[in-house]
Image: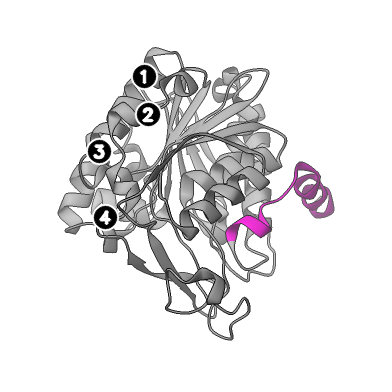
Amino acid sequence: MCVYSGVQRRLRLFPHRQLRRDADRLRPYRLRRVPRRSPWFLEGSRWAPANVAIAVARLGGKAAFVGKLGDDEFGHMLAGILKQNGVIGDGINFDKGARTALAFVTLRADGEREFMFYRNPSADMLLKPEELNLELIRSANVFHYGSISLIVEPCRSAHLKAMEVAKDAGALLSYDPNLRLPLWPSPEEAREQIMSIWDKAEVIKVSDVELEFLTGSDKIDDADALSLWHPNLKLLLVTLGEKGCRYYTKNFHGSVEAFHVKTVDTTGAGDSFVGALLCKIVDDRSILEDEPRLREVLKFANACGAITTTKKGAIPALPTEQDALTLIKGSE
């Protein structure tokens, strides 16, 4: 989950738990013996809330991560990547009895992805409510999370506890379901659990594919998007890839065009978009009620998402603020 706090701009991220590690070969726990450059896979790391945390840190914000990793080389590698990228790791736990989850990501010619996961059970699934760093969570201004941590206990209870504590402390709750159907027992269970916490979030981002899944409609239009609206919601976003994004608030709605770049890998583009949005609203939530200012923020978020697609792997491609501003200026 992501927590973003006021002037110090702190963002905390709760486990979205699909650790996507583009491992070099199928030798998951012999990291030092894996060739670093493979014709098939590139080594990397990616799991959604952690990507958002790094995106925020790279844009000049302050972010922290809350979750659980295996006490193995993969887990310590991932914790190290967070630290190297300026993310506070005080909320990370290590499990000596379970391994860090793995994922293999393959790219199609158009840069879209397919996933294969190894995680049953993995350390992230075993996070307990009593292991949460509650003081860290209470210090957040924004608390960002996904849905993968809702799949099984005890992680589901930890997720719900963290949301409750963050909300009681005054944090803005931000939700990106980040649907990964292969991880769920069934599509029906995925839909039920994703929607079970829907009315708690104040900012929600879904992709066009997730909108279709959640509504059961094959249309991407305002009526279907607004069917997901709830009274506590301040901003609903639908990302549309190369077509930009749509936004919905209580008083207005509209769309913002995308930036056209040469796409190599779409991994992390949505996380980069979310990180940019949260960076801009953490200190001034009134932006959510001011359409011209919100459109400027979403333009910046679209630029960040676009830049992230221009390289392989999420983390190496996450932009700085100057990168985004340069793209925006060049398109004017």
| Picture disc at residue 165 | 1
Residue sitting at x 27%, y 40%: 155
**Does dot 4 land on a helix, a strand or a loop?**
loop
Residue under circle 2?
A: 132
Real-space Cα separation, disc 2 to disc 1, in angstroms: 10 Å
Q: Is tag 3's residue or tag 1's residue first in the polypeptide sequence?
A: 3
Please state the extent of the stretch shown in magenta in the rendering.
314-331
**Does dot 1 land on a helix, a strand or a loop?**
helix
Real-space Cα separation, disc 1 to disc 4, in angstroms: 35 Å
Residue sitting at x 62%, y 55%: 315
Q: Are marks 4 and 3 in contact (CB under 8 Å)?
A: no
Residue 330 spot, x, y in % from top left: 83, 54
**Does dot 2 land on a helix, a strand or a loop?**
loop
- All told, the count of numbered labels is 4
Residue under circle 3?
A: 156
Residue 47 spot, x, y in % from top left: 47, 53
Disc 1 packing (10 Å; few <14; some 14–19; many ≥20): some
329 on left or right of 134: right
Residue sitting at x 53%, y 39%: 254
Q: Is tag 1's residue or tag 4's residue first in the polypeptide sequence?
A: 1
Residue under circle 4?
A: 217
251 on left or right of 116: right
Q: Is tag 2's residue or tag 4's residue first in the polypeptide sequence?
A: 2
Q: Are marks 2 and 1 in contact (CB under 8 Å)?
A: yes
Q: Are marks 2 and 4 in contact (CB under 8 Å)?
A: no
